[in-house]
Amino acid sequence: MANSIVLAVSSLFVLSILFSNGDAASPNDVVSTICPKTRNPSFCSNVLKSAGTSDLKGLATFTLNLAHDKVTESRALAQSLASKAADPKLKEHYDTCAGRFDDAVDDIEGAKSNLGNGDYNGVNTYASAAMTEADDCLDSLTKPPKDSSALSGDGKIVEDICSIILVVSNLLIGGA
């Protein structure tokens, strides 16, 4: 009799582990919670599905690393375009973007540091600043002469990633 009770309790325990989500949300739950609040939900969905985690801190780390990579790449592109631009106005626009993306790299690094310290408000503030830097670059590229490079697309991607970071950091603030 005691053996059958132990077996039943053990079976229930194993089943509860197998079928429970615990505190972790499924990737679909995370996408449906976060992405509608971002500026580009379909982009967000693709990014979060590739993150390999549904943990908010893990998502913050993943998206901050993604933002850092894209901002660094965008800065290098802006610097390269500025060095090759024949039109002085276009060179000025690219130089502006290089400076903005340089500041955005610092902002993303600040956000990563704040995440490590559990300061989710700081993550939010720095991500917002990086998004503003990308927006300032995009604004400069709307002025003549026309820019035909990939830089404006890169700037929009940076903004989209930062938008995800803002939502994730707000959820971390609410759960802290």
Image (cartoon, rainbow, N blue to C red):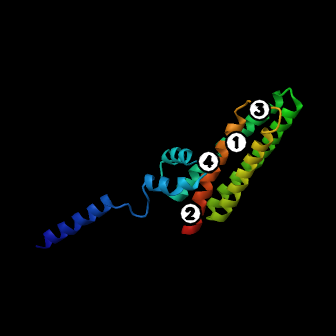
Q: Which of disc 1 and disc 2 is earlier in sequence? A: 1
As helix, strand or loop, the secondary structure at mark 1 comes to helix
Q: Which of disc 1 and disc 4 is earlier in sequence? A: 4
* Picture residue at 62% right of the left edge, 60% below the top: 116
The residues tagged by marks 4 and 3 sit, at their Cα atoms, a distance apart of 28 Å
Pointer 4: what residue?
A: 65
Pointer 1: what residue?
A: 155
The residues tagged by marks 2 and 1 sit, at their Cα atoms, a distance apart of 25 Å
The residues tagged by marks 4 and 1 sit, at their Cα atoms, a distance apart of 16 Å
Pointer 3: what residue?
A: 147
Q: Which of disc 3 and disc 4 is earlier in sequence? A: 4
Q: How many residues crowd around disc 4 within 10 Å: few (fewer than 14), some, or many (20 or more)?
A: some
Any part of residue 73 in sight: no
Q: Which quarter of the figure has residue 22? A: bottom left
The residues tagged by marks 2 and 3 sit, at their Cα atoms, a distance apart of 37 Å
As helix, strand or loop, the secondary structure at mark 4 comes to helix
The residues tagged by marks 4 and 2 sit, at their Cα atoms, a distance apart of 18 Å
